[in-house]
Amino acid sequence: MTIHQSPEAFGYDSFLATHQSKEVLRFITCGSVDDGKSTLIGRLLHDTKQLFDDQVTALQRDSRKHGTQGAEIDLALLVDGLQAEREQGITIDVAYRFFSTDKRSFIVADTPGHEQYTRNMATGASTADVAVILVDARQGLTRQTRRHALLVSLLGIKRVALAVNKMDLVGWSQDKFEAITAAFHAFAEPLGFTEIRPIPLSAKNGDNVVLPGAAAPWYTGMPLLQYLEEVPVRVEEQAAPFRLPVQWVNRPNSDFRGFSGLIASGRIAPGDAIIVEPSGRTSTVARIFTADGDLPHAVEGQSVTLVLADEIDASRGSVIVTADAPMRVTDRFEARLFWAAETELLPGSTLLAKIGTVIVNATVTAIGNRIDPETGNPAAAARLVANDIADVTLSLDRAVAVDAYGANRDTGGFILIDRETTDTAALGLIHADKTATTVKDEPESTRAAKSGGGFLSKLRWVFGGI
C-alpha cells in the first residue's frame, strides 16, 4: 500500500513562508591579499551549518590537494573555486555565496585583494549594504586596505565591520587591536561612514565569527555574525523619495495597461500624484497590481505594476516618481568614474551609458581631478587608465532622469559600456552638480522628443543612435 504524505505533514508551507519573509542582507568581504577573506566566508558557512556531508567530504579531499593549512581543512576552498585561485591560493573573481540564519538571509560577495583585480572588488561592492573590511593583525592597515575602504565609501556603503583577523597569531593582543582600530578611524574620518564596528577574530579557528571567543576576555562586544544579523539594512533607500524605473509596459489586453518595475526607493499608494520622468507628464496611481493581487501600498524592493488614472505615454527607460519629489532631468552631468577598462579614457571618448533602464550615447567632454586611491586627495589628470578614479563631465544624446548618487544609489549610479566590445568599461556615480545643464523648463513636447519619445527618437534609432 502506498502512503501519500501531504506537504503540510512535513511543514513545507510554513518553512517556505518563514524563509521568504526574511530580510536579506548583501555584504562584501574586502581588504588586502591574504587577510583571510575567503577563509572567513568558509567559516561562516561551516559554523552556521550550511554544508552538506558530501560538501564536507569534498572539502577534505580538496584540502589535501590544494589546501594551505597543512593537515587541517582549508575553508577558503569553499569560495575559491577557479583552478587558478586554488593553484595560487588567492581570490581572482568575485564569488557569491548564500546562507541563512533564523534572523536573516545573507548574500555575501568574496572580493579579491590584489590591486589588478580592484575592478572586481568594485563590482561586488556596488550592490552591497555592508562591508566587512579585513585586516591582518600582524600587518595592520595596508595600501590595499585603504584603497578598498575608499572605494566602499565612494560606492555608498555606510556601515563597515572592521574585522581584525588572525588575532591568534599576535597572542590576542589588545594593544595591537586598539592600535589598528585607532589607525582605521583616523583614516576613515573623512569618508562619511555611518558606523564602524571593530571586531577581533580568528577566521581559521572561529573565534568571534559565529560564536564569542574565549581567547580574548577583554573584548565584550558581539561576534561578527550577530552584527550582520542586527545591522540596519537599506535605511537610506527606505527613507528616500519614491522611484520606479519602468522595465516594461504590461499590456496583456485592451482593458489593462500598467508600468512594471522594481521600486528602487520610497513608498507609493493608490491616489498618490506622480510624474513620469523625463517627459514630465503627470497622473495619479489608480492601482498597485501584483501577481498576488492589488496592494494598499508598496515600498522599496517590491516588484509591482502601477496602473495610472490617465492614459499617458511611458516606456522602458522612464522613471515614475511622486509629484512632490521630481528627479533632475538633464543631458549633461558630472560624475565620479571608476575606470575598469584596459584601454585609456580620453576627453572626447564616446561610450554607451546605462542609467537605470535606459541606454544612451555618452561623450566624455572633460576629465577633472583623479582621486588618489590611498589618501582620497585629488590631482589633475589628462587621461584615465585601469583602476583610476576620477571626476568627469558627460554629455548625453538625449535628456534622462537622474538623482545624485548620494541621495539614491539606484537612480544615481550608472555604467559605461564599450561600444565595440560591449564590455563594461566603468562604474559611475552622479554628482549633485548645480552647474549641470537641465531641461526641466523646456516645453513638454521638446522634452519628450529629447528623452526618447516621439518621431525624432525613431529617426535617431534608425540612423544610428541607440
Image (cartoon, rainbow, N blue to C red):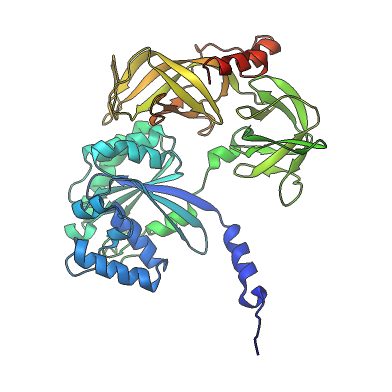
Residue 61 in sight in this render? yes
Between residue 142 and residue 427, name the one nearer to us. Answer: 427
Rendered-image quadrant of the N terminus? bottom right
Q: Describe residue 201's horizontal placement relative to residue 158 as left or right.
A: left
Dividing the picture into quadrants, the one containing residue 313 is: top right
Residue 128 in the image, given as x and y percentages of width and height: 44, 43
> Which residue is drawn at the image coordinates 27% and 26% (left, top)?
372
> Which residue is drawn at the image coordinates 32% and 29% (left, top)?
341
Residue 320 in the image, given as x and y percentages of width and height: 66, 30
Residue 454 in the image, given as x and y percentages of width and height: 67, 16
Q: Residue furthest front?
A: 462
Dividing the picture into quadrants, the one containing residue 2 is: bottom right
Residue 209 in sight in this render? no
Judge whether 35 appears above or below 367 on screen. below
Q: Describe residue 208's horizontal placement relative to residue 302 as left or right.
A: left
Judge whether 166 appears above or below 323 on screen. below
Judge whether 53 appears above or below 91 on screen. below
Between residue 171 and residue 384, name the one nearer to us. Answer: 384
> Which residue is drawn at the image coordinates 27% and 65% (left, top)?
205
> Which residue is drawn at the image coordinates 28% and 14% (left, top)?
382
Dividing the picture into quadrants, the one containing residue 112 is: top left
